[in-house]
Amino acid sequence: MREKIGATAGKIWDTLNDGERVSVSRLPKMVEEKDVIVYQSLGWLAREGKVEYHRKGNGTAVSLVK
């Protein structure tokens, strides 16, 4: 499971690497992974200080820390 979370964190990193903010709810489809794995991967990246969260209407978006 840890390997899958790490691999998904890499996919998220690649997806966010263009500098755009992406809705957290869209990420699972974008990286073709289950919601729970994506959320755990985001937690991993957040813990390492790699991503930041942004309020977007009623939702939340995420981007890489610059």
Image (cartoon, grey):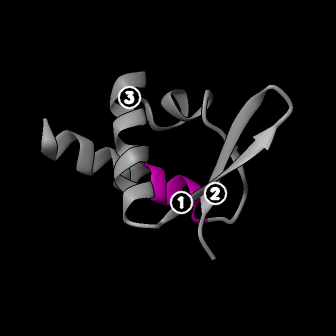
Q: Secondary structure at mark 1?
A: strand
Q: Nearer the viewer, mark 2 or mark 3?
A: 2
Above/below status of 5 relative to 39: below
Q: What secondary structure predominates along the stretch shown in magenta?
A: helix
Please identify the quarter of the rendering in which residue 66 is found.
bottom right
- Amino acid carrying label 1: it is Val
- Residue 63 at x, y percent in the picture: 63, 57
Q: Which mark is residue 51?
A: 1
- Residue 4 at x, y percent in the picture: 20, 40
Distance in Å between CA atoms under marks 1 and 2 = 6 Å
Q: Secondary structure at mark 3?
A: loop
Distance in Å between CA atoms under marks 1 and 3 = 18 Å
Above/below status of 15 relative to 61: below
Q: Are marks 1 and 2 in contact (CB under 8 Å)?
A: yes
Q: Which mark is residue 63?
A: 2
Instruction: Bin the neighbour count of mark 3 within 10 Å (Cα to Cα): few under 14, some 14-19, many 20 and up.
Output: some
In percent of the image, x 26 and y 49: which residue is there? 7
Q: Quadrant of the N terminus?
A: top left
Distance in Å between CA atoms under marks 2 and 3 = 18 Å
Viewer-nearest residue: 35 or 55: 55
Residue 34 visible in the current orientation = no
Q: Which mark is residue 9?
A: none
Q: Residues in magenta? A: 12-17
In percent of the image, x 48 and y 59: which residue is there? 14
Instruction: Bin the neighbour count of mark 1 within 10 Å (Cα to Cα): few under 14, some 14-19, many 20 and up.
Output: some
Above/below status of 39 relative to 41: above
Instruction: Bin the neighbour count of mark 2 within 10 Å (Cα to Cα): few under 14, some 14-19, many 20 and up.
Output: many
Which residue in the protein does label 3 denote? 33
Q: Earlier in the sequence, mark 1 or mark 2?
A: 1
Q: Are marks 2 and 3 in contact (CB under 8 Å)?
A: no
Residue 15 among magenta residues:
yes
